[in-house]
Amino acid sequence: MGAKGGRNLRGIEGDPSEEGLYVKVNVTMPPSMIKRLDKFMNEEERSRSWIIQKAVDEWLKERGF
């Protein structure tokens, strides 16, 4: 996701000038969290990336960012 939000993915707000841009990042999580994430991912038929983007977007909005 770009510095101003990047691509707009079903409810994830972004800067239109950055439409389609992504920044690749690595995230380290405990195995138990990955297991839960993968279970949710399969049930929702979404990618890990989409779920993490949505969660971070909502978390930041709650804090006014």
Image: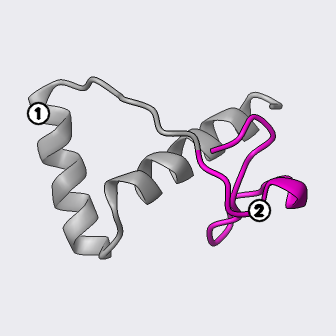
Question: Where 10 falls versus 7 (above or below)?
Answer: below
Query: Mark 2 falls on what kind of element?
Result: loop
Please name the residue that numbered disc 1 is placed on: 32
Q: Which amino acid does label 2 sit on?
A: Glu
> What residue does disc 2 label?
19
Q: Quadrant of the C terminus?
A: top right
**Mark positioned earlier in the residue sequence (2 or 1):** 2
Q: Is mark 1 on a helix, strand or loop?
A: helix
Residue at (62%, 67%) from the top-left corner?
9
Q: How crowded is mark 2: few (under 14 residues within 10 Å), some or many (20 or more)?
A: some
- Residue in the picture at 77% in, 62% down: 19
Q: Which mark is residue 16?
A: none
Q: Which amino acid does label 1 sit on?
A: Ser
Q: Position of residue 13 (x, y in %)?
A: 77, 57
For discs 2 and 1, the disc positioned in front in the rendered view = 2
Query: Which portion, as a residue range, is magenta?
Result: 1-22
Residue sitting at x 62%, y 45%: 1
**Residue 6: % across, % down:** 72, 51
